[in-house]
Image (cartoon, coloured by chain):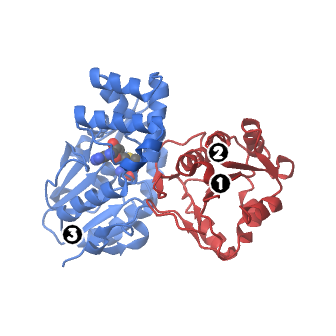
Amino acid sequence: MAVRAEAIVMGASAGALEALSTILPALPEGFRLPVMVVVHVPPDKRSVLAELFQAKCRIPVREVEDKEPIAAGTIYFAPPDYHLLVETDKGLSLSSDEPVLFSRPSIDVLFESAADAYGAALVAVILTGANQDGAKGMLAVVDAGGRAIVQDPDGAFAPAMPQAAIEMCPAARRMSLSAIAAYLQEV
Amino acid sequence: MTESLASEKIEDIEIRLLLEALYTRYHYDFRNYAMASIKRRLRQAREQLGFPNFSAMQESLLHEPSMLPRLLRYLTVQVSEMFRDPPYFQAIRDKVVPHLRTYPSLKVWIAGCSAGEELYSLVILFREEGLEDRTIFYATDISQDALHAAEAGIFTLDRIPLFTENHRKSGGKSSLSEYYQAAYGRASFDKSLRRNVVFSDHSLVTDAVFGEMHLISCRNVMIYFDRLLQDRALGLFEESLARKGFLGLGAKESLRFSPHAAAFADFVREEKIYQKRAD
Ligand SMILES: C[S@@+](CC[C@H](N)C(=O)[O-])C[C@H]1O[C@@H](n2cnc3c(N)ncnc32)[C@H](O)[C@@H]1O
């Protein structure tokens, strides 16, 4: 716990909107960390996530464009049909690589690349979802010394995804949505 | 770079050396690709090709030329669709084509053409708009597999419903089924579509400009490059485009972060279509 956090990564699937609506709007103005978010969305949709959350949040919200430099205190959504990756120079890359576990964007892909880029200075959060995405990624975060937070499956809209993450990373901390919202403001 | 070498992870050192070997021995230059995604794909290659580590993979690559095509299959990403992002093609049709009509002859470059999906989309669009006969299409890629597939023009039938739907949504004036014959689970696109196409092995990283273009479409290729390489490629496009020529990028690519931005004006902003300034 000694290392000061430099970034947050987050993954959510079924039930994502409500879960994120508890967490993201709670982040205060002047929040220091960048937050990279993967939500599973259908590939053919023009994403409305960034617009939707910009209206609710007190810090800037963007849908990522390729090679965008990461700015402090900004929320970044992966665009539909692209993987989002963090480069070691702290820039954001997109890729059209094959879906992973049927998902593009994939939470594993974001988490694994962010673990490489930030090491112990990363906080990873897995929220509600009906699949297994993010569990492997969370393991990479833990192996690199980062912090793992999982929404308590008991309260989750879809428990499978947080459950899978806990099974892969027993050391992950289980929290309710409101506890996660409070925790992120302190890291 | 040098001062951080001491703390570089062993795997990162091995990957750097592997890419160096690939370049020195075979002149394929992936050294400045966006590393996060290269690393992912190399790990996949290492696992599936059964090497204990990247050093072993490097040894095999240096001594066994047959490793080269196998590795390249992992390093280049062949994901595409015909009329991918229909609004892009609609914008080419409605906004760019009216300008192109004013030229007696046209050159179009599809850079990173993959198996030809984007190429056939543009040729069909140009035919529908009556411009095909006065146009030469240059379809380039670094992947031999991709170029062969593009020249063959054969796609599995299960992909055709999506292509057809995309074509329709892009404002297609004909039915896609007019351009292919279906048999044995495959759709073969008509060879007349290739009448004015030049296929060529060309790398945006190591090769130079080869002609003056009116339209360059380079979609979802530069996302695999780091910013330095992107700048090199954009420099090529700037040099190659005729004055007031058009450049189309992928839906989530942008000139915003590039020093070449000043040479281009937004033409259809939402679709990432730019026009080279007349200066
Ligand atoms: C994801 S595909 C994009 C296909 C198509 N343009 C589209 O948007 O659907 C990327 C293509 O870029 C090619 N490519 C990668 N590096 C390249 C380079 N240095 N020069 C030219 N093409 C390259 C790959 O072989 C692959 O065919």
Marks 1 and 2, Cα distance to the nearest angstrom? 9 Å
Marks 2 and 3, Cα distance to the nearest angstrom? 59 Å
- Cβ of mark 3 under 8 Å from ligand 1: the answer is no
Label 1 chain ID: A
Which chain's colour is blue? B
Front position in the image: A86 or B215:
A86
Labels 2 and 3 touching (C-beta < 8 A): no
Which chain's colour is red? A
Residue B270 x %, y %: 44, 70
Farthest residue to the right: give it.
A154
Mark 2 vs mark 3: give the one in front. Answer: 2
Comes first in the chain, label 1 or label 2: 1
Front position in the image: B159 or B62:
B62
Marks 3 and 1, Cα distance to the nearest angstrom? 61 Å
Query: A40 above or below B59?
Result: below
Tell me what residue is drawn at x 35 percent, y 54 percent: B222
Quadrant housing residue B156: top left
Mark 3 vs mark 1: give the one in front. Answer: 1
- The amino acid type of the residue labelled 1 equals Val
Tag shown at residue A3: 1
Q: Which residue is mark 3?
A: B101
- The amino acid type of the residue labelled 3 equals Arg
Q: Residues within 10 Å of mark 1 (few under 14, many from 20)?
A: few
Tag shown at residue A145: 2
- Position of A10 with respect to B216 (left or right) is right
Tag shown at residue A181: none
Front position in the image: A105 or B186:
A105
